[in-house]
Amino acid sequence: MKLPFNTRRNDFSANSEFTSGLLAGALLGLAVGILIAPRSGKDTRKKIAGAASQQADELANKWDDAKSETRKQLNKYEDKAASVANKLTDKAEDKADHLADDAKSAIDKVKDVFRIN
C-alpha cells in the first residue's frame, strides 16, 4: 500500500523534471534565435544589454517597494506591540495599586486590633 506522501514526492520530482526540461528548451530556443537573428552581433549585444539594464532597473524598483512595504508592516506591528505593552503595564500598575491598598487596609485593621486591646 503506497502512502499519499510518497505519491506527492514523486509528483514533485516529475514536475521538477518537466520544469527543468521546459527551462532548458526555452534557453536553447533563445540561443538558436540569437544565432540566426538577422541583426549584427553588435546590435544584438546592444539589445541584450538594454533588456538586461531594464530588467535590473525593474528588479531594483521591486526591491525598493518590498523594503518599503516591509518597513510599513514592521512599524504597524511595533505600534501594536507598544499598545499591548502599555495596556499590560497599566493593568500591572492597577493590580499593584490594588494590592497596595489591600495591604494598607490589612495593616490598618491590625493596628485597630492592637489599639482596642
Image (cartoon, grey):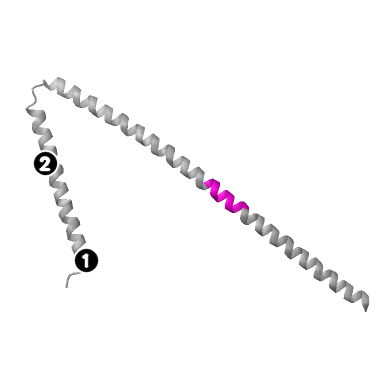
Of the 4 image quadrants, the one containing the C terminus is bottom right
Disc 2 and disc 1: Cα gap in Å?
Answer: 31 Å
Q: Is residue 101 left or right of residue 2?
A: right
Q: Secondary structure at mark 2?
A: helix
Q: Which numbered tag is attached to residue 81?
A: none
Q: Quadrant of residue 14?
A: bottom left
User: Where does residue 98 sit, x and y in percent of width and height?
Assistant: 73, 63
- Identify the residue under disc 1: 4
User: Where does residue 9 sit, x and y in percent of width and height?
Assistant: 20, 60
The reply to whether the magenta stretch includes residue 84 is yes
Q: Residue at x 11, y 29 (%)?
A: 34
Q: Residue at x 22, y 25 (%)?
A: 49
Mark 1: give few (<14), some (14-19) or many (20+) Cα within 10 Å: few
Amino acid at circle 2: Gly
Q: Residue at x 34, y 32 (%)?
A: 60
In the figure, 77 relative to 8: above or below?
above
Amino acid at circle 1: Pro
- Identify the residue under disc 2: 25
Query: Magenta segment range?
Result: 78-86
User: Where does residue 40 sit, x and y in percent of width and height?
Assistant: 11, 20
Is most of the magenta stretch helix, strand or loop?
Answer: helix
